[in-house]
Amino acid sequence: MKISLFITCLAEMFYQNVAKDVVEVLERLGCDVNFPKGQICCGQPAYNSGYRKDAQKAAKQMIKSFEHSEFIVTPSGSCAAMFKEYPELFKEDPEWLKRAEAIADKTYEFTQFIVNVLKVEDVGAVYPAQATYHTSCHMIRLLKETEAPFKLLKNVQGLELLPLENSYDCCGFGGTFAVKMASISEQMVDEKVRHVEESTATLLIAADNGCLMNIKGRIDRKGKPIEVKHIAQILNTRVEGRN
Amino acid sequence: MAEGTIHNKDAFLNRIADKLGRKQSEVVALPAWKHQPQWSVFEDASSDDLLAAFCKSSTAKSVFVKETELANLRETLEEVIKKHGGGPIVTTKDARFSEYGLEQLFSDPETHIWNAALGRRNVELAKQANIGVIFSDISLAESGTIVQFNDRDIARSVSLLPVVYVAIIPKSTIVPRMTQATQLVHGLVKSGKELSTCINFISGPSNSADIEMDIVIGVHGPVEAVHIVVTDK
Amino acid sequence: MPMKIGEQPFFDRVDEALENDFMRTAMASAQDRLRGRKLDATVNDEQIGDWEEWRSAGEEIRRHTLENLDFYLNQLSENFSKRGGHVYFAETAEDATRYIQEVAKRKNAKKITKAKSMVTEEIGLNEALEEIGCQVYETDLAEYILQIDDHDRPSHIVVPSLHKNKEQIRDTFRDKAGYTGTEEPRELTAFARSQLREVFLEADIGVTGCNFAVAESGTISLVTNEGNANMVTTYPETQISVMGMERLVPTWKELDVMVNLLSRSAVGQKITTYITNLTPQLEENSVDAPKEFHLVILDAGRSNALGTEFQSALHCIRCAACVNVCPVYRQIGGHAYGSIYQGPIGAVLSPILGGYEDYGELPFASSLCAACSEACPVRIPLHEQLIRHREIYVAQKGKVSEKLAMKAFGIGASTPSLFQGAVKGMPAIMKPFVKNDSISSGPGPMKLWTSIRDFPSPEQNNFRSWFKHHKDGGDS
């Protein structure tokens, strides 16, 4: 299966190891991964801040980069949701609307792709730890993908998943919200960190680098002994003999 | 009530039509709704199922429930009255009381039967009453709700002012939910019947959760409620 | 403007709210309790079937009604007046209050009882009535608490006194009303009952809002629990109901669906204790019903939304489900919004009704987590409307620096060579700030981020080179 990787600007700039894990997991599952070179950023920072025109520029660049792809896979529910928002972004431009719809239809978040398209729930990973999982808002509410990450984590050998109180509440990232409304965002991420601590987990997993950057940033600042990892990092671990 | 009036209508509605990008609509047909989940609730329930659900829902709304047959209704009502502190009692003016053999029970001077000719004096008596007794016109299984079509005789005060309201619920009045009751009212409107000035859906004693979300029973309306279901009527 | 709460700038209000631990604890615990109750009465209630179907039913009804608003308002007013009621269409808040003042003067009214109504808060009706010498009594417990606490303002559209705990309420009752009891909610509630009992029977005018009006019969439907709305609409000789012009349904059949959505979404009840449906009466000689019934239908900026992308904001049925799940409201409470309409729906409605000058910052007070859109029983796409507001706001009032930054973003995000340069250059640029693989004090716009959290340091490897190498078979 040929898939095009949309790695996200955040991963490309700050989380290259996550990006490599994504590639390796997909390849192990038999995908032929390619990387469209023109890709930059989905445009969400501008779109959510009210700069529609500037977001359209970013979106056009992405549409051009990905329109020949068969499947588009990205390790971020939020960025995937932004691709799905492209038709709205170009609703007044019939030509681009058509191209936007084509992109939206073939975009999948990483775990969603593995579970729903590849039909794999056990990737053969092994990760002994007591962890808890942060459900990213855009993944559960805009993509409406609530199950895929849990199905995959359930089959990770050695991993015990502990419940997270108020898991449905936003971590306070929200893109530019985190800096525009920094004092409110701080209270939100503090509450999230408190719930993570109360779960007694020593590892926090999520499927979106945006949320992770926010929560990890706060955990590190407060010096909490909690590791933070993207789900691809967990899924890309294996020992010989499994699968 | 005197002749009604309408002020500023045309300018107001024209502005709306204008914003909606058209002229004022003269005829609009109600669409056939695509989504009507309300009709599936208790769709296949028997009248016994509905009765059981009504009792359960009433209890959940902090209502005391009694089931009785018509032959024992009077006795049951007497017990209920006693248990909830006795008179004074106020009742609506309702032919069903004699139909259900309760006329004699209310011949007691402690009981005031609403009499519009007495004017405000009725309200005074209802305020002093401990118990108000009424009939339910339609009863909703889903939520333990009684419905009253109030008028000059089926006065609003009877279920509102006394400390306790006691409603007599003929089993035959129990329907699945509000859907069937509003359907009936819609039918009345369609057929040109005049609606009661107050159609009241009542589900148990008054209550409030305005202080720290703690539910307190008994605010401005009744503090206790009793539903007596007459199982063979 | 009566809709407005306080004169401070938005960020000052937020700072003040964040320091109020009492209020914040109250908000969080109220949200948690309401969430459980709502789930039990909606998605977890098997009896009512698929909650999503109900939401679709609500959406469908609201959309049709708003698309034909002029028709149904006309029908409503004809049916209401046919029964002897008086309908006044008020374009502005001032028109509405002036009309109600005139009625009160004509009736020589002294005492006025009120049931809870956000729309009368919106138009500042209490102040207008007090101005002409009337004594106004709020009778909903929450509104009563606010009124006797020197007219404190609502912090929640369903439970306006949500920001107060029982100890604060006890103290207010003691200081202002001679209460001598404890902080037990039961005892406090009994006190309010005893204080208002006589007032209900003596009042000259009863004022209510309107949850839904039924066009086909000219009926006003009130959805309540305390019994106060029944008292307010039963004993005074004159009743005045004020409705936002969008609050109506075509027929009784739709009333059923809407009331169900409202009760379950607002407080997690299958049905509220009272659903009181009032039509002006034709009958003479009734003892306990108003003799004169006025309906004031209010625009006050609502029509700004008609025919625009904000039209569906008028589908709102004021259940506060969006407020109850909002993680921002959870932290800052209701007053910080500076509007009597708070939370996500407040951030959408307030700029429509009151303009961007006063309320333009509210749409930014959201992380766009979409919990609001998910909770809304009539599927208003609230978080999307917040983005639409932001678009209008930045076009009108955006800071030049931000506009330039976003322009640069647009150029950067459509020019691969620039982006690649930035990615490659990033480690070198950021190097001076990196300590132990993270950045705890960043330059420029990163400062706000790093004031409370660390920033990841750019990794040294370039993903694209790794990928190319990897594909060429050099890496495994």
Image: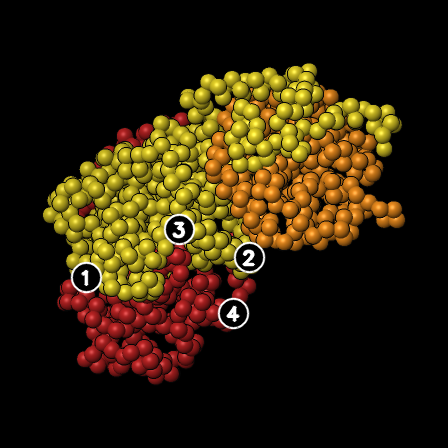
Chain colours: A orange, B red, C yellow
Q: Residues within 10 Å of mark 1 (few under 14, many from 20)?
A: few
Looking at marks 2 and 3 on the same chain, the residue that comes earlier in the sequence is marked by 3
Tell me the amino acid under the disc marked 4: Asp
> Do badges 4 and 2 share one subunit?
no
Name the element at disc 3.
helix
Q: What's the amino acid at mark 3?
A: Phe
Closest to the observer: C215 or A178? A178
Q: Residue at x 56, y 46 (%)?
A: A192
Q: Determine if marks 3 and 4 fall on one subunit.
A: no
Q: In terms of sequence position, does the residue under pointer 3 or pointer 1 come before the other?
A: 3
Residue holding disc 2? C44
Q: Mark 4 = which residue? A: B49
Residue matched to label 1: C198
* Distance CA(mark 4)–CA(mark 1): 43 Å
Q: Is residue C10 above or below residue C267?
A: above
Q: Earlier in the sequence, mark 1 or mark 2?
A: 2
Query: Do circles 3 and 1 both sit on a common chain?
Result: yes
**For this rendering, which residue is in front, A209 or A114?**
A209
**In the rendered image, is residue C72 in sight?**
no
Determine which residue is flagged by label 3: C22
